[in-house]
Image (cartoon, rainbow, N blue to C red):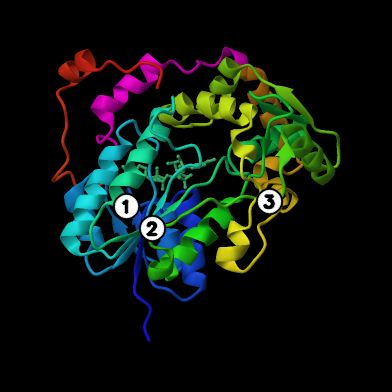
Amino acid sequence: MINPKILVTGATGKTGGAIVTQLLAKGWPVRAMVRGRDARSDLLQRRGAEVVVADIFDPGQLMDAMRGVQRAYYCPPYHPFVIQSASAFAAAARETGLEQIVGLSQWLAGPNHPALLSRQHWLIDRMFEALPNIAYTAVTPGFFADSPYLEMMPFAAHLGVLPLPVSGESRNAPPSVDDVARVAVAALLDPARHAGKAYRPTGPALLTVTEMAAIIGQIVGHKVRHVRTPLWMFYKGAKALGREPFLLSGLRYWFQDNERGAFAVGAPNDTVRELTGKDAEDFETIARRHAALPQSRQTFRTRLTVFANFLAVPILPGFDPVRDLIPWRTTAHKSSPCRRRHVWRSPTRTGRRATGVRGH
Ligand SMILES: NC(=O)c1ccc[n+]([C@@H]2O[C@H](COP(=O)([O-])OP(=O)(O)OC[C@H]3O[C@@H](n4cnc5c(N)ncnc54)[C@H](OP(=O)(O)O)[C@@H]3O)[C@@H](O)[C@H]2O)c1
């Protein structure tokens, strides 16, 4: 029997990229959705995926992307109007007769959460659940091991610090991106079994941030100390790394939740083993992968670069919700290189005046 093709959105991103890799490895045909053609989409194509260019906010382009597939992974982008992308996705799914959506959500998703993204995740889950004749499965992880914790690996490897704006006692059993993807893939391969379910993948052990620093230290061969960074300083560094302003607007709340123990509730669990038949990857295994990346390897050049970047952080521009989020209203789609047939754009001046975006 020929396996049906699966649409994967966010195919150049963390979870989408891992899902494409895993589906192809299992012999399932994949249609990888990307924002534009570039070296990353070429690589997806060379690895065997069919590549389709579409904007996740554009219902017409989504319909084109969905034609001929029955199952899809929905990856919500970090965007203040993310729920609009989900509405477009739902409309296109109904129009084209999609039979299953597996969506990435959050452990912290809730109707009253202070982060706008977490509130929108909750609404998106409710909207997808209510779609008639479409099986919906939500994957609801807490903070991944890979992001934010191990994004700090270059600082740990070269400078011996793990800078994060939380207390060292904050706990999580963070899953790897690959395990989050494995759970999504399990759901995609068996829609009937997983319809109507929500799965929270975790890592195998609850760890404090201090313990994570110690594990990283064993891998890089010298002591690594967790340093509680002021939020404003963390934002400067994250912004310099190109993190989306809307992600930054939510991070402060999620770090507070981390500190208050929200990720320790119900963790660790057996979700990864139950759905995939394999144990969840432990923090050390995931950290070893990050330590092997070029930016964390022990060369004079990378050490100098990381040191210079670290020293520059305090003088970099910080995150300003008004300055950084308002432009989204008027430029969100302008950078998209895909066809603009269905794209709505507001007049710049009106858009700026009318926007009342505050902290989130
Ligand atoms: N990190 C965590 O700890 C964590 C925990 C729980 C839940 N989550 C959820 O994870 C989600 C992000 O998933 P991720 O980390 O896998 O994604 P990611 O690495 O941030 O990548 C986002 C993907 O979406 C694509 N994309 C963005 N805007 C698009 C548009 N307008 N049209 C088409 N594609 C677009 C990006 O394309 P380009 O590469 O071209 O930009 C990229 O492929 C968020 O909703 C977040 O709430 C994250």
Q: Residue at x 49, y 66 (%)?
A: 186
Residue under label 3, please give it. Answer: 286
Q: Nearer the viewer, residue 336 or 109?
A: 109
Say whether mark 3 is within 8 Å of ligand 1: no
Ligand 1: image quarter: top left
Query: Which residue corresponds to the image point at 48% horizontal and 31% vertical from the top-left?
Result: 242
- Upstream in sequence: badge 3 or badge 1: 1
User: In the visual, does 35 lie left or right of 21?
Assistant: left
Q: Give the range drawn in magenta.
A: 314-335
Q: In which quarter of the image is residue 147?
A: top right
Measure the C-alpha gap from mark 3 to mark 1: 32 Å
Badge number at residue 129: 1
Q: Please indicate, yes or no, whether residue 271 appears anywhere in the rendered image.
A: yes
Which mark is first along the chain, 3 or 2?
2
Residue kind at label 2, given as amino acid type = Gly
Q: Position of residue 264 (x, y in %)?
A: 64, 39
Looking at the image, residue 82 lies above or below residue 138: above
Residue 66 lies within the magenta run: no
**SS for callout 2:** loop
Counting residues from the N terminus, which is met first, the one under dot 2 or under dot 1? 1
- State the separation of the CA atoms marked 2 and 3: 30 Å
Can residue 301 be seen by looking at this rendering?
no
Which mark is drawn over residue 196?
2
Q: Judging from the image, what secondary structure is the residue with disc 1 in?
A: helix
Instruction: Tell me, yes or no, whether the two marked residues, 2 and 1, touch with CB atoms within 8 Å.
Output: yes
Disc 2 and disc 1: Cα gap in Å? Answer: 7 Å
Numbered circle sitting on residue 141: none
Q: Which residue appears at 28% of the width and 32% of the height?
A: 332
Q: Do the residues labelled 3 and 1 touch (CB within 8 Å)?
A: no
Q: In this view, does 192 lie above or below 122?
A: below
